[in-house]
Image: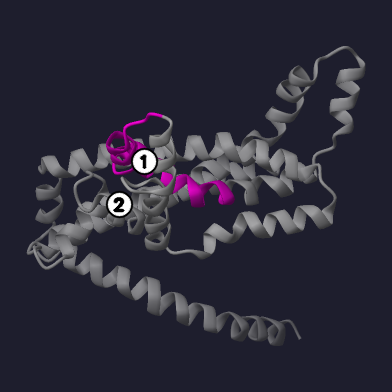
Amino acid sequence: MERNHSLRLGLLALPGLVFLSLFFVLPLSVVAVEAFTDGGSAFVRLWASGAFWSSLTGSLILGTVAPLASLAVGFPVALCLAGLPPERRTTLMFVISLPLTFSGLIVAYGFILGFGRAGFVTLLLAELGADPAEVGALLYSPTGLAFAYSYYLIPRVVMVLVPVLVNFDRRQLRAAESLGASSWRAHWDILIPQILPAALSAYCLVAAVALGAYGTALALVGTQLPILPLQLFSMVSETGSDFPMAAALSIVLMALTSLVIALAEGMGRFGQR
């Protein structure tokens, strides 16, 4: 009986294993073989490249600032949604999650239409005396890229934090306030410590997305901004020729994002204890 149960579970898992093998294990194996075709010297050339360290620095800055801004905005939104009735919360969650259905290129073009040099918001600010050239140029900078990334990072933060905040026992806050604590102090001393693991998990998840995303960055800044995904795009485009080095860079980028995801999983498990 137990053997038949295990066999059925194995058959149910078989499609997932096949899918994982074809679209993860096999491509990763090909990339790894390519990276080590010259005995691993591609990694040495990558480490010796100034462009790599510049791109790594840019990715780490972008992968830190954009998630921080997204968490700062997403947490109050999630806190507000958690206090709403289930029907209204479900409706608003659906609206908030809509940006996740758009590709990075569509998001980038939307921001260009809104905040570019001739964008709707830019022209409105020009009516108030702002220089449209300066306002429009901001979108094509690292700050503007972090702003655009936040458009689809904030919904991810909200979706991670809302279930945690919904299950939080707010009677603890009311008890603290009845004992003389201010609302701000009660939230800081009681709410924040309990949801901190979930908040750090959400931060790591959106940081991994920011580190690996390239569609929005490519449409906004081309290959001028030094970040790892854009450097990898340049190396595998028609102008690229050192494919072992490109494969080595892709492995480094995957390892970096996997490390961040592993931290998110660790934070999530710590919060469940």
Identify the magenta region: 129-156
Question: Residue 256 lies in magenta, yes or no?
Answer: no
The answer to if 154 sits in the magenta stretch is yes
Q: Position of residue 258 (x, y in %)?
A: 41, 52
How crowded pointer 1 is (Cα within 10 Å; few <14, some 14-19, many 20+) is rated as many
Q: How many marks?
A: 2
The image position of residue 192, as x and y in percent, is 69, 29
As drawn, the residue found furthest toward the front would be 127
Q: Nearer the viewer, residue 253 or 222?
A: 222
| Quarter occupied by residue 219 | bottom left
Q: Earlier in the sequence, mark 1 or mark 2?
A: 1
Camera sees residue 7 = yes
Q: Amino acid at mark 1?
A: Gly
Q: Nearer the viewer, residue 49 or 129?
A: 129
Label 1 sits on residue: 144
Q: Which residue is mark 2?
A: 220
Horizontally, residue 128 falls left or right of residue 164, namely left
Which residue is located at x 29 percent, y 44 percent? 140
Q: Is residue 206 left or right of residue 164?
A: left
Amino acid carrying label 2: it is Leu
Q: In front here: 176 or 247? A: 176
Q: Position of residue 58 (x, y in %)?
A: 28, 39
Decide: few, some or many residues near mark 2? Use Cα within 10 Å; few <14, some 14-19, many ≥20. many
Is residue 271 left or right of 44 when viewed as pictured? Answer: right
- At horizontal 53% and vertical 65% (from top left) the residue drawn is 101
